[in-house]
Amino acid sequence: MNYDTELYELLEEKARQYNQPSFIETDPIQVPKQFSGKENIEIGGFLAATIAWGQRPTIIRNAFHLMRMMDNNPHEFLMNTSEDDWGDFLEFKHRTFNGTDCLFFLRSLKNIYQRHGGLEAVFTVGYRKEQRMESALRYFRQVFFEVAHETRSQKHVSNIDKGASAKRLNMYLRWMVRNDDCGVDFGLWNHIPMSALLLPLDIHTGRQARQLGLLSRKQDDWSAVLELTENLRQFDPLDPVKYDFALFGMGAFE
């Protein structure tokens, strides 16, 4: 793909337009935005991202409900309660994410904070294996499923080795890693560079990217994520996923 000045200017303009605090009002990122502590932001963000498919108002409503079930202090809740206190979570449901999945996710997150130093540590260890997000995603999945679980729960953490686009995990990583002064992403994690992030590919960003000639692959899969992110790096090698705001904004709101 040749560098296109007109396209660059469009992407920059749209990224500026949508990378604004007003974006938060319709986005699941508002769920972790209620917290100030690092661990609560990480855990609240991870759980909100996990159920981020379907109608956005429903995603946000269910994610806030999940936070209330954890006394709006998810880290302290995980660390200071036992599974005997978690019976209510069997009733939680978001589309195909059910109570069994929810209990396992809490169990696994507790394990990650007790034995692996937290979510940032797990993703950072994985990233450093190959200095690539692919190794971060693979290692995270390996650690996440080291706790006993039902096979059904595996579908709720994307497997890039089966071609999944890992949209929700890449979105979560954007929230945690991207650091600018616009007030949307948190920029909490300092050990993974923004340049390594990969675009959270969904139906909106995929359609828009194809219309703009940024993506030739027809499926919204892992190969498409790599192709699109590589093309966006030509416009900003240090922060390619800022254009997620542009592509998603144009695709979802225009």
Image (cartoon, rainbow, N blue to C red):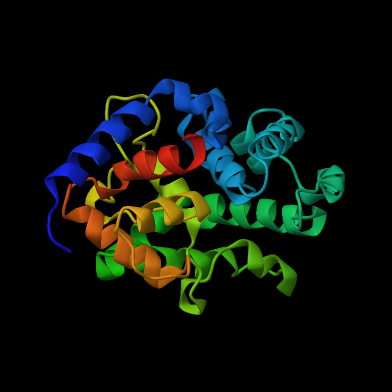
In the foreground, 22 or 183: 22
Report the quarter where the N terminus lies.
bottom left
- Farthest residue in the bottom direction? 162
> Is 44 left or right of 1, judged from the image as shown?
right
- Farthest residue in the top direction? 22
> Is 173 left or right of 142, judged from the image as shown?
left
> Is 55 left or right of 43, judged from the image as shown?
right
Question: Residue sitting at 67 percent across and 48 percent down?
Answer: 54
Question: Residue sitting at 38 percent across and 45 percent down?
Answer: 247
Answer whether residue 189 is visible to the viewer in this image: no
Residue 40 x, y percent position in the rendering:
54, 34
Please state the total of marks drawn on the protein image. Answer: 0
In the foreground, 200 or 169: 200
> Is 113 left or right of 13, judged from the image as shown?
right
Residue 156 x, y percent position in the rendering:
64, 61
In the foreground, 176 or 112: 176
Residue 218 x, y percent position in the rendering:
44, 70
Q: Is residue 220 above or below residue 93?
A: below
When asked about the image quadrant of residue 16, the answer is top left
Residue 167 x, y percent position in the rendering:
49, 56
Answer whether residue 190 is visible to the viewer in this image: yes
When asked about the image quadrant of residue 216, the answer is bottom left
